[in-house]
Image (cartoon, helix red, strand yellow):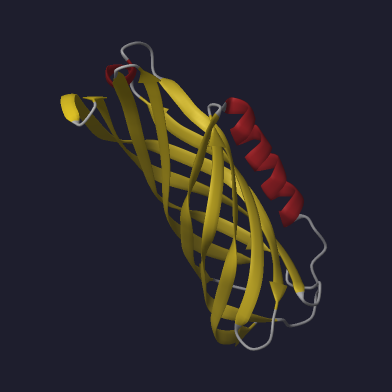
Amino acid sequence: MRKLLSTALLLFFVVLVYPFSAWAQDYPKVELFGGYSYSRMNGENWTGWYATGAKNLNHMLGITAELSSFANSQSQTLAPYISTIDQHLYTFLAGPQLTSRDKGKLAPYVHLLLGVGHFYTNGSLMSGSDLISFQSASGNHFAMFIGGGIEYKLKGPFALRGQMDYGGVRFGASQLGGASSWTKGWRFSTGVALHLGTKTD
């Protein structure tokens, strides 16, 4: 994940030195975003929903908070047994977001999000309709994602967004039965943003 952090710092530097317009700009005080999200982590497919709320400090810099939920289910049949594993990941993250608002209807942005990933999993072994065994585990772990996207302004306070992030959740040795490790990968989100209030630099 050191390469991820290095990439994040480079990306934020590029945005900071990007030649933003010198004249006054209008920007929303608060931005709310929600939609569908797909993630590919450690070779597994996860689907769920994604939501953020951002407080803009000026036309470029804001603080955003994220709440998301992803699920993954796997089953395997070895007659007469059926093994099922259900996994759930919830993220609670926050961090800085940089947005370029001088491109008309388009507004690209980048962000770095840090926080907690809550992981919950349960596994069951069935024989026909009989439950043979059931196990569950859960825990909170450090999570980090770096990414961004682009927003297309619609009429009124609404906008469409597409977003891509890379990062993951760091699981400890007690959860994995060995050395600590990252569950990491890409996630793609799309949905509708709502702009509330207007300010001018």
Seen in the picture, residue 104 relative to 171 is either above or below; the reply is below
Is 111 placed left or right of 94 in the picture?
Answer: right
Residue 105, position as x, y percentages in the image = 77, 76
Tally the marks.
Answer: 0
> Looking at the image, which is closer to me, 176 or 145?
176
Q: Quadrant of residue 139?
A: top left
Image-based side of 67 in relation to 103, left or right: left
Q: Is residue 124 in view?
A: yes
Q: Residue at x 55, y 47 (%)?
A: 38
In the displayed structure, would residue 137 be above or below residue 15?
Answer: above
Question: Residue 47 location, x and y as percent?
Answer: 49, 47
Closest to the observer, 3 or 141: 141
At x 69% / y 81%, what residue is drawn? 154
Q: In this view of the protein, which residue sits in the foreground, 196 or 14?
A: 196
- Coordinates of residue 184 in the picture (x, y in percent): 52, 31
| Residue with the most extreme top position | 178
Instruction: State the quadrant of the N terminus.
Output: top right
Position of the C terminus, as image quadrant, is bottom right
Q: Residue at x 56, y 79 (%)?
A: 195
Classify residue 19 by image quadrant.
Answer: bottom right
Q: Is residue 59 visible?
A: no
In the rendered view, would you say 101 is above or below 91? below
Q: Is residue 197 left or right of residue 98?
A: left
| Residue at image coords 64%, 89% | 156
**Percent coordinates x, y for residue 15 in the rendering:** 73, 54
Residue 18 vs residue 85, the one in the foreground: 85
